[in-house]
């Protein structure tokens, strides 16, 4: 178990918290905690022994808490708590669970570091509020649930469904052909290009076992497969959602996670230029993408890049004089997701 620290505003790879502090003054940092970290914190407050007995988890969590308290770092756990408190069946918020989880983490952070360590010695057990809903073979109702993830989920979920189907029905097609088919799908049917999704697709179709496990390891039944794709779609909302917080907090957002795959996607994107007007971005940020850790050969990557560049030229002229119609795009994505879900269920 290892906690990973990533930021689209720090161009070097961060291998430890000590390296992070060497690169950026702690006063400028705001940590954004992934869902898994929030769950560890909740569990540690409510039942300390459940975390302390897991040596690797406790060592990482204790180190994180020490740095947060001794350096007086700013921490935001709202994204992780929100995801953790949404029902499996329809993605609606479980308010009882939300209040309970927020209270647990806030109470923990109200302690100083010495009190946090002493807390580990308590024989304490508080019953957790659990999600009793069941997974379903469709996420169409979940897509309609209001959340900070919602609009990005339409894009991510459609793209991940398509990736899985292309890979499952590949026949004799090469990985490059599948990647190009995917790019065509995004251009013609999704009509929105997400940097994190394109990077994920590069890893996925190039044969990265780490990335492919994220989708393929689930049971071959509809509700399990769909839920695995849905969870991955949520994960891929974190890079853009966390990174744009710089405009509101005026601090450098650093994402903390125990998920190596999500860290891999984060580290492949670095923002070079962002143009803002107050707390709003006036233009999409200029993002530099690093695909050196994908499994493509140089020749394969050149072939894909050439095709991708042609698509971007078409899109540049397509949207030069047309205002982006978000409602039209979302309405189209509803139909795309439904069609792809039906196709997925027919082959399972």
Image (cartoon, rainbow, N blue to C red):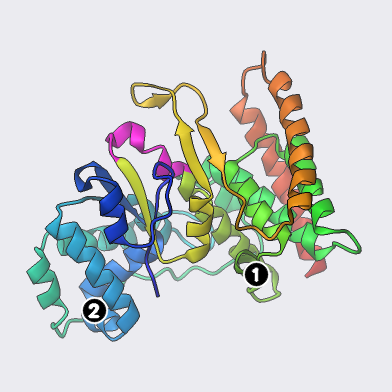
Residue 140 visible (yes or no): no
The disc at residue 289 is none
Tell me residue 294's x, y (percent). Answer: 64, 58
The disc at residue 209 is 1
Dot 1 crowding, Cα within 10 Å, few <14, some 14–19, many 20+: few
Q: In which quarter of the image is the C terminus?
A: bottom right
Tell me residue 62's x, y (percent). Answer: 23, 71
Q: Is residue 247 magenta?
A: yes
Q: In which quarter of the image is the N terminus?
A: bottom left
Tell me residue 20's x, y (percent). Answer: 31, 54
Is 25 above or below relative to 125? above
Residue 296 visible (yes or no): yes
Q: Nearer the viewer, residue 17 or 215?
A: 17
Is 301 above or below relative to 210? above
What residue appears at the point 26 percent right and 58 percent down from the top-left corner?
Answer: 102
Q: Is mark 2 on a helix, strand or loop?
A: loop
Q: In which quarter of the image is residue 327?
A: top right
Q: Give the range drawn in magenta.
A: 240-251
Magenta: main secondary structure equals helix
Q: Quadrant of residue 188?
A: top right
The disc at residue 47 is 2
Q: Name the side, left or right, on which 168 lies relative to 204.
A: right
In this view, the mark in front (2 or 1): 1
Q: Nearer the viewer, residue 319 or 80?
A: 319
What residue appears at the point 73 percent right and 21 percent down from the top-left corner?
Answer: 318
Q: Earlier in the sequence, mark 2 or mark 1?
A: 2
What residue appears at the point 27 percent right and 67 percent down from the top-left corner?
Answer: 41
Q: Does the magenta stretch include residue 133?
A: no
Q: Which of 194 and 9 is in front in this view?
A: 9
């Amino acid at each position: 178990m290892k906690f990973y620290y990533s930021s689209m505003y720090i161009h070097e790879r961060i291998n430890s918290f000590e390296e992070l502090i060497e690169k950026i003054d702690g006063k400028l940092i705001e940590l954004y905690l992934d869902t898994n970290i929030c769950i560890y914190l909740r569990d540690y407050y409510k039942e300390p022994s459940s975390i302390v007995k897991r040596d690797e988890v406790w060592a990482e969590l204790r180190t994180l808490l020490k740095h947060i308290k001794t350096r007086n770092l700013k921490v935001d756990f709202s994204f992780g708590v929100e995801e953790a408190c949404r029902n499996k069946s329809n993605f609606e918020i479980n308010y009882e669970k939300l209040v309970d989880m927020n209270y647990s983490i806030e109470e923990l952070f109200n302690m100083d570091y010495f009190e946090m360590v002493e807390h580990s010695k308590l024989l304490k057990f508080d019953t957790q509020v659990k999600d009793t809903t069941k997974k379903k073979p469709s996420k169409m109702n979940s897509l309609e649930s209001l959340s900070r993830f919602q609009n990005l989920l339409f894009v991510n979920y459609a793209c991940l469904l398509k990736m899985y189907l292309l890979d499952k029905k590949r026949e004799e097609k090469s990985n490059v052909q599948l990647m190009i088919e995917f790019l065509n799908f995004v251009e013609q049917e999704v009509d929105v290009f997400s940097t994190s999704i394109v990077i994920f697709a590069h890893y996925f179709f190039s044969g990265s076992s780490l990335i492919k496990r994220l989708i393929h390891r689930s049971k071959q039944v509809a509700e399990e497969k769909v839920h695995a794709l849905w969870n991955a779609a949520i994960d891929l909302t974190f890079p853009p959602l966390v990174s744009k917080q710089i405009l509101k907090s005026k601090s450098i957002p650093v994402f903390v996670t125990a998920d190596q795959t999500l860290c891999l996607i984060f580290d492949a994107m670095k923002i070079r230029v962002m143009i803002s007007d107050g707390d709003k971005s006036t233009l999409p940020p200029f993002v530099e993408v690093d695909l050196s850790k994908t499994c493509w050969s140089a020749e394969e990557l050149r072939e894909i890049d050439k095709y991708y560049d042609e698509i971007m030229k078409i899109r540049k002229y397509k949207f030069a004089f047309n205002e982006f119609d978000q409602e039209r795009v979302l309405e189209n994505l509803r139909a795309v997701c439904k069609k792809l879900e039906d196709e997925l269920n027919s082959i399972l």
